[in-house]
Amino acid sequence: MAMIALKAPAIEVKVVDMNAERIAAWNSDTLPIYEPGLDEVVRQTRGKNLFFSTDVHGAIKAADIIFVAVNTPTKTYGVGAGRAADLRFIESVARTIAEIATTPKIIVEKSTIPVKTAETIKDILGANARGVRFAVLSNPEFLAEGTAIADLHNPDRVLIGGERTPEGDAAVKTLVDVYAHWVPRDRILTTNLWSSELSKLVANAFLAQRISSINSISALCEATGADVDEVAGAIGRDSRIGSKFLKASVGFGGSCFQKDILNLVYLCDHFSLPEVAAYWESVVKMNDWQKRRFATKIVRSLFNSVADKKIAVLGFAFKKDTNDTRESAAIFVCRDLLAEQARVVVYDPKVPADEIRSDILGKGKQDPRLTIASSAYEAAEGAHAIAVVTEWDEFKQLDFARIFAAMNKPAFAFDGRNILDLAKLKAIGFRAHGIGK
């Protein structure tokens, strides 16, 4: 919404939420989301044609286009628990719009949702709208956290799905015209509703599948003496495969990949395609195994016990340049190490200490074996091992000789992102390990 406001100054954009604390943060100098470049875009547009408000009623009433961008987490209860998307917030917004709207609206699904969710929205609107006409579009988001602003400036594609009716075509054109303020028309793809909804799930599933595939090979590389970066470089030169998403690591995280794959698995089961469901579920299982394998390697390398040993975990966000910790590999690595009675010290440059504790232990819980450091040097002091779990650029610039001198010996280094020079670490004196090396 901030980018639309920036690129289309004649369009008034209102971001509304019932959470007054969150809206206050968007109106402050400290935004609730860390994303490189976002502060500048918001500063340029806020108060001009970009507004943040809790006036949901007024915004719905005045809007021509309503983007629905609510959370759609994986269900934790009932039918489809652990796999299906929880659509309670989508339904709630649809009912709110139907209750308030008095003029025709274009409703745009922005949340990641399962196929046929548009039917749910249309049914609710049709049953409660008192004659007001609505057009429902699908406009899934393909941004990558950490590069979202750059992705918005120059997107690979913008996908808009609508009904193949005169009213649906007109609604699609209206939204196309919004993006056409800065996106070349040949990058704005239009499809039917169901193709658009499914494309988001499948795109994330395919990307996650590539990560799990190369991570499975990283284990084979370690067993055979091959180097996973060299293998990835060789196969990535094949134009049919390509080089992207072939970076071995401790495992993928974030709000999208696992949730969307599990949603895809649920859909396949629902449509009686158990073999397809099992295939995609194996991608998630491989990712979970890679996280466990990393933690297990730390334990085995430290003479099969980390009890009462201090382990410094560098990085907690699921990837660099974001403060998002959802499904972060660091959560699972820390839990596994704590279960082995290790003393775990975590440092991340952007994630608050309270959030780290809550993610690992649960809200309001404490564990004296878990502490949060204010720097990588503080975390490593007196540690038996350091483990890089997020690829923050600052970790590449650390003075590892200083870190080595402050650690217990033998000192171990485990690079879960393959961003460090293992040869240099070994020359310093570390017993250094990478993924697939």
Image (tube, helix red, strand yellow):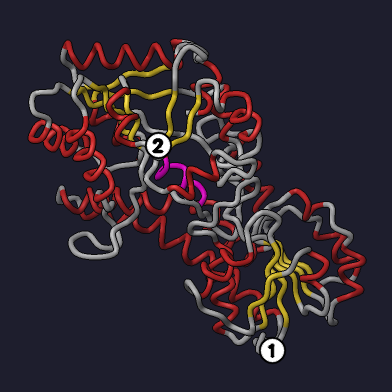
Position of 214 with respect to 13 (left or right) is right
Q: Residues within 10 Å of mark 1 (few under 14, many from 20)?
A: some
- Image coordinates of residue 92 in percent, x first then y, are 23, 45
Task: Tell me which residue sits at (33%, 54%) in the image.
Answer: 262
* 180 versus 436 height, above or below: above
* 353 versus 123 height, above or below: below
Question: 163 or 216, which lies in front?
Answer: 163
Question: 51 or 93, which lies in front?
Answer: 51
Q: Which residues are magenta?
A: 204-211
Amino acid type indicated by mark 1: Asp
Question: 423 or 39, which lies in front?
Answer: 39
**Disc 1/disc 2 C-alpha distance (Å):** 48 Å
Amino acid type indicated by mark 2: Val
Task: Tell me which residue sits at (57%, 71%) in the image.
Answer: 357
- Reading the image, the residue beneath label 2 is 16
Secondary structure predominantly adopted by residues drawn in magenta: helix
Task: Tell me which residue sits at (20%, 53%) in the image.
Answer: 269
- Image coordinates of residue 295 in percent, x first then y, are 59, 73
* 293 versus 94 height, above or below: below
Whether residue 138 is visible to the viewer of this picture, yes or no, is no
- Image coordinates of residue 128 in percent, x first then y, are 10, 35
- Reading the image, the residue beneath label 1 is 308
- Image coordinates of residue 433 in percent, x first then y, are 73, 66
Between discs 1 and 2, the one toward the N terminus: 2
Quadrant assignment, res 145: top right
Position of 24 with respect to 273 (left or right) is right
Q: Residues within 10 Å of mark 2 (few under 14, many from 20)?
A: some
Position of 72 with respect to 358 (left or right) is left
Magenta stretch contains residue 83: no
Task: Tell me which residue sits at (42%, 42%) in the image.
Answer: 204
Quadrant assignment, res 66: top left
Callout 2: helix, strand or loop?
Answer: strand
